[in-house]
Image (cartoon, grey):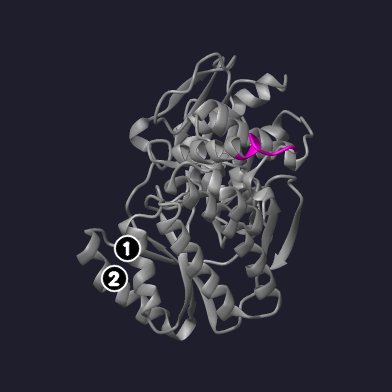
């Protein structure tokens, strides 16, 4: 989105506000290459930020309230919210995400004067590419600039996550907000979700290979899905293990595969043993993927992606027929190196690595087969890693 067009559109919506803008900002969305559903278990993840994202223009107003408008849900109109932030989240409203971040700043005594917020995003709706974290991060970047809070990037990431956990009510980990703020062009972020230590891994694929996103176009709502249920199951596993350990664990991903095999016997259900198996083995797959990328073994990366999806499908049970169908088709299509669900699951997108000269054939194959099985029509997006959130 061109900055001048963005400002023009914002002024058109808030036509009664002649004040100069406070600033314009952008936050990308993210794709997780591997390491799914282990961020809230203290594991390692390997996401990268992409060019889809959320733009924001902020304009101070003289009305004594905050006003918000999103070009993506224009039927909601302009929403008015109190400057003192003393209202709870309203179920299923998009403005919970920016308002929750404003509340985080308010609680830290960085108070924003009454302002108008204009949002525009090109992230496919309900795609699992973390549109909510993108909105949170772009708001945090903007408020840090406007209020002159001078908070470091990690503090902004933590505030965005706190908004999601404590205001919106989604028990997510920190991966999405972190990847969106810390993303770099041609890099993936290797993040330890326990310590928050991170490093950049070159994400430059062979010239004949490209990442391709396939959108199931089955909308998902993680708050209404079984995402929080999986978090609770992992907490139950952790509690059971800590009851028999001298040195207590903070996260399940502190364990290796040998320790996992030892503790599996104390879990009272096969379901919990399968959940446990996914968490520990997925964490190991992240390290294996990093080593494969460094060694240029792209076929190995692809096999690990397929293995990750198999675990998410059968052990963690967060994929669904739509994502499983896409990955099954990918396995049997020439030129597809690897594929897996990316994001929270229950719909959303799959990420695949495809030979460039086979992309057209893969798109046609999925487009022909997928609707007959699922009743949905897929969408496709070529992506690459881009820089993180910023003022524009």
The residue positioned 78% from the left and 39% from the top of the image is 152
Q: Position of residue 153 (x, y in %)?
A: 74, 42
In the image, 273: left or right of 138?
Answer: left
* Category of crowding for the residue at label 2, using alpha-carbon neighbours closer than 10 angstroms: few (below 14), some (14–19), many (at least 20): some
Is residue 252 something that shows in the picture?
A: yes
Q: Position of residue 269 (x, y in %)?
A: 44, 44
Disc 1, SS = loop
User: Viewer-proximal residue, 174 or 5?
Assistant: 174
Q: Position of residue 172 (x, y in %)?
A: 55, 40
- The answer to which quarter of the image holds residue 137 is top right
Q: Which mark is residue 378?
A: 1
- The answer to which quarter of the image holds residue 110 is top right
State yes or no: discs 1 and 2 in contact (Cβ < 8 Å).
Answer: yes
* Secondary structure that dominates the magenta span: loop
* Category of crowding for the residue at label 1, using alpha-carbon neighbours closer than 10 angstroms: few (below 14), some (14–19), many (at least 20): many
Q: Position of residue 217 (x, y in %)?
A: 33, 55
Q: Which mark is residue 367?
A: 2
User: Viewer-proximal residue, 126 or 320?
Assistant: 320
The residue positioned 47% from the left and 23% from the top of the image is 89
- The answer to which quarter of the image holds residue 385 is bottom right
Is 31 within the magenta? no
Question: Does residue 219 lie above or below 116 as drawn?
Answer: below
Is 242 within the magenta? yes
In the image, 337: left or right of 92?
Answer: right
Q: Which residues are magenta?
A: 241-246
């Amino acid at each position: 989105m061109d900055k001048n067009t963005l400002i023009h559109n914002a002024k058109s919506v808030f036509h009664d506000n002649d004040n100069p803008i406070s600033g314009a900002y952008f936050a990308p969305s993210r794709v997780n290459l591997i390491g799914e559903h282990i961020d809230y278990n203290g594991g390692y993840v390997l996401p990268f930020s992409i060019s889809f994202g959320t733009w924001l223009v902020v304009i101070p107003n003289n009305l004594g309230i905050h006003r918000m408008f999103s070009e993506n849900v224009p039927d909601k109109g302009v929403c008015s919210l109190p400057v003192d932030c003393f209202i709870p989240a309203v179920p299923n409203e998009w403005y919970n995400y920016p308002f929750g971040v404003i509340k985080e700043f308010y609680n830290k005594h960085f108070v924003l004067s009454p302002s108008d917020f204009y949002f525009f995003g090109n992230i496919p709706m309900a795609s699992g590419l973390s549109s909510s974290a993108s909105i949170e991060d772009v708001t945090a970047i903007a408020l840090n600039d406007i209020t002159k809070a001078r908070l470091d990037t990690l503090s902004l990431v933590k505030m965005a996550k706190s908004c999601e956990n404590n205001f919106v009510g989604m028990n997510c980990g920190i991966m999405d907000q972190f990847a969106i703020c810390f993303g770099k062009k041609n890099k993936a972020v290797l993040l330890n979700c326990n310590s928050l230590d991170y490093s950049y891994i070159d994400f430059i694929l062979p010239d004949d290979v490209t990442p391709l996103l396939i959108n199931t176009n089955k909308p998902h709502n993680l708050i209404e899905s079984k995402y929080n249920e999986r978090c609770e199951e992992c907490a139950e596993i952790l509690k059971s293990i800590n009851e028999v350990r001298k040195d207590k664990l903070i996260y399940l991903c502190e364990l290796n595969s040998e320790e996992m095999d030892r503790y599996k016997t104390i879990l009272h259900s096969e379901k919990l043993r399968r959940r446990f198996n996914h968490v520990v083995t997925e964490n190991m797959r992240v390290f294996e993927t990093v080593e494969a990328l460094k060694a240029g073994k792209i076929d190995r990366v692809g096999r690990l992606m397929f293995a990750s999806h198999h675990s998410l499908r059968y052990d963690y049970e967060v994929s669904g027929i739509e994502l499983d169908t896409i990955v099954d088709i990918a396995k049997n299509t020439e030129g597809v190196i690897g594929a897996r669900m990316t994001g929270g699951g229950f719909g959303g997108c799959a990420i695949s690595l495809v030979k460039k000269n086979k992309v057209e054939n893969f798109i046609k194959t999925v487009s022909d087969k997928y609707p007959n099985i699922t009743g949905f029509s897929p969408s496709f997006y070529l992506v690459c890693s881009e820089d993180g959130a910023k003022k524009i």
